[in-house]
Structures are given as structure tokens and as C-alpha cells.
Image: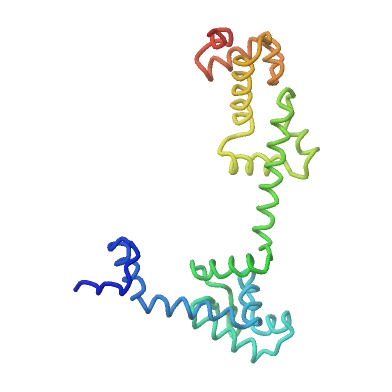
């Protein structure tokens, strides 16, 4: 059966409007979403949920950490569990609670932290590492004429060699050496195009003491010797 036309037409595409109206008719979906977002209507419930996103605890410990009574905590836990946001694990007579590993729970967790500007310890650590790697990256590019070792970088920045190499590859998709080589060759090509510097000086400015090694690296990158690349 065709959908009845809207009272006012404002130039909307009929197919687009039909899709939107079909989604709006999915009332069960919106009811589920409303139930999840309803959990944000109580500050104590938010605190409990946020806590259980980071650890697994029993009612007594949750009550102690939040300075609440156990019955009050149990009430909020029941509500959160009924909404599918918490999971339980029984060990003997003790029941432990933790956040569910679902898209809805993760979204709510992230929303709480973004709104409250509270960084998850793991995310904070990862964000700080990425920020540090970007600083190191910028430092390397502004000192391209130098051959800076991993050990020297770990003395300049508070990061260990393994983390440095792993996070750098995660951020830039390649190793430090390969990434720098690409940038060195790009800068060398620019210098060859835009200046009359001798090839030896171009090599020095991009961190090569040996002109022969620079020439080999440049040819590998561009398929031409530096002097051939410079020709008009």
C-alpha cells in the first residue's frame, strides 16, 4: 500500500521521504532507544554504569565506592540489567556486575565521557600516546637533515622503544624508517625541482652523508637518478 502524501510538499524526493517514514514507523526501535537513554535520567545510575564500564564489582563494593546503601545500588543495577546494559557473573553466593559488551553499552559509555569530559583511563593513555607520536613525527620532519636514532628519541620523549615503534606504525601505517625515507625523497625531489643546489647538498639536507646511498634511494623511489630527475 502506498504511503499517503504529506500535506505540504517542499521539494523532497518521494523515495527519500518514503524511507524516512518507514523508519519512523519502527516504533519498537525508538521505544528501545528511549529505554536506554532513560538510564541517563538518574545521576546515581550513571555513576554505577560508568564504574562498571571499567571494572567488575559486587553490590557491597559498589555501595561502598559510591557511598550509597546496598538496596539503592541493587535497585539501579536491576534497572540497568533489565535494559541490557549490564551483565552478571555468579561466583558461589556472590554476584558480580559489569557493563555489557554491546554496541548500545559502548555508545552510552562514550556519550557519558564525552558529555562529562571524563576520559576513560585506557582511552586517555592511548590518546596521550598518539599525541606524543605526532609530536615525535613533527620533530623528525623538522630535523630531517639529522639521523636520529630510536634511542635518542626515547631520551627526548617519555616513551619506550617498543611502544614508540608500535604506536607510530598504528598511526602512520608504516615503520619510522620507511615513513621518513618517503618524506626525505619527497623533500629531495622538491629541492631538485626548485633549487640549483648540488646533488651532494640535497643529499645532506635530507639526512644522507653518502651521496651514493642517497642516489640509490632516490632512484628506487622515482626510477631516475637525481640529475636525470632535475633535467627539464
Number of numbered discs overlaid on the protein picture: 0
Locate residue 218 relative to residue 204 in the image: left or right.
left
Q: What residue is rendered at 53% in x and 77% in y?
A: 37
Q: How is the image coloured?
A: rainbow
Locate residue 87 relative to residue 117 in the image: left or right.
left
Which quarter of the figure has residue 176? top right
Depicted 152 relative to depicted 197: above or below: below
Q: Residue 86 location, x and y as percent?
A: 54, 76
Q: Residue 77 location, x and y as percent?
A: 58, 83
Q: What residue is rendered at 64% in x and 80% in y?
A: 58
Q: Nearer the viewer, residue 176 or 114?
A: 114
Q: Residue 118 location, x and y as percent?
A: 69, 66
Query: Farthest left residue?
Result: 1
Q: Nearer the viewer, residue 147 or 57?
A: 147
Q: Nearer the viewer, residue 217 or 189?
A: 189
Query: Farthest right residue?
Result: 155
Depicted 75 relative to depicted 218: above or below: below
Q: Give the position of the N terminus as an image quadrant.
A: bottom left
Depicted 2 relative to depicted 152: above or below: below
Query: Farthest bottom residue?
Result: 71
Which quarter of the figure has residue 74? bottom right
Amino acid at each position: 500500500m502506498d504511503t499517503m502524501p504529506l500535506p505540504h510538499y517542499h521539494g523532497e524526493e518521494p523515495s527519500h521521504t518514503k524511507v524516512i517514514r518507514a523508519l519512523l514507523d519502527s516504533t519498537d526501535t525508538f521505544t528501545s532507544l528511549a529505554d536506554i537513554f532513560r538510564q541517563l535520567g538518574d545521576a546515581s545510575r550513571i555513576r554505577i554504569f560508568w564504574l562498571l564500564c571499567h571494572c567488575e564489582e559486587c553490590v557491597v563494593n559498589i555501595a561502598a565506592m559510591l557511598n550509597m546503601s546496598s538496596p539503592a545500588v541493587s535497585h539501579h543495577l536491576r534497572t540497568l540489567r533489565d535494559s541490557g546494559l549490564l551483565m552478571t557473573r555468579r561466583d558461589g553466593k556472590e554476584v558480580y556486575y559489569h557493563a555489557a559488551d554491546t554496541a548500545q553499552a559502548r555508545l552510552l559509555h562514550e556519550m557519558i565521557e564525552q558529555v562529562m569530559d571524563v576520559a576513560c583511563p585506557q582511552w586517555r593513555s592511548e590518546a596521550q600516546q598518539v599525541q606524543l607520536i605526532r609530536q615525535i613525527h613533527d620533530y623528525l620532519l623538522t630535523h630531517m637533515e639529522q639521523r636520529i636514532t630510536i634511542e635518542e628519541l626515547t631520551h627526548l620523549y617519555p616513551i619506550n622503544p617498543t611502544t614508540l615503534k608500535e604506536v607510530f606504525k598504528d598511526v602512520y601505517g608504516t615503520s619510522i624508517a620507511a615513513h621518513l625515507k618517503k618524506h626525505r625523497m619527497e623533500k629531495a625531489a622538491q629541492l631538485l625541482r626548485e633549487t640549483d643546489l648540488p646533488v651532494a647538498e640535497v643529499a645532506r639536507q635530507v639526512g644522507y652523508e653518502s651521496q651514493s646511498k642517497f642516489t640509490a634511494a632516490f632512484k628506487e623511489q622515482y626510477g631516475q637518478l637525481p640529475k636525470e630527475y632535475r633535467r627539464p
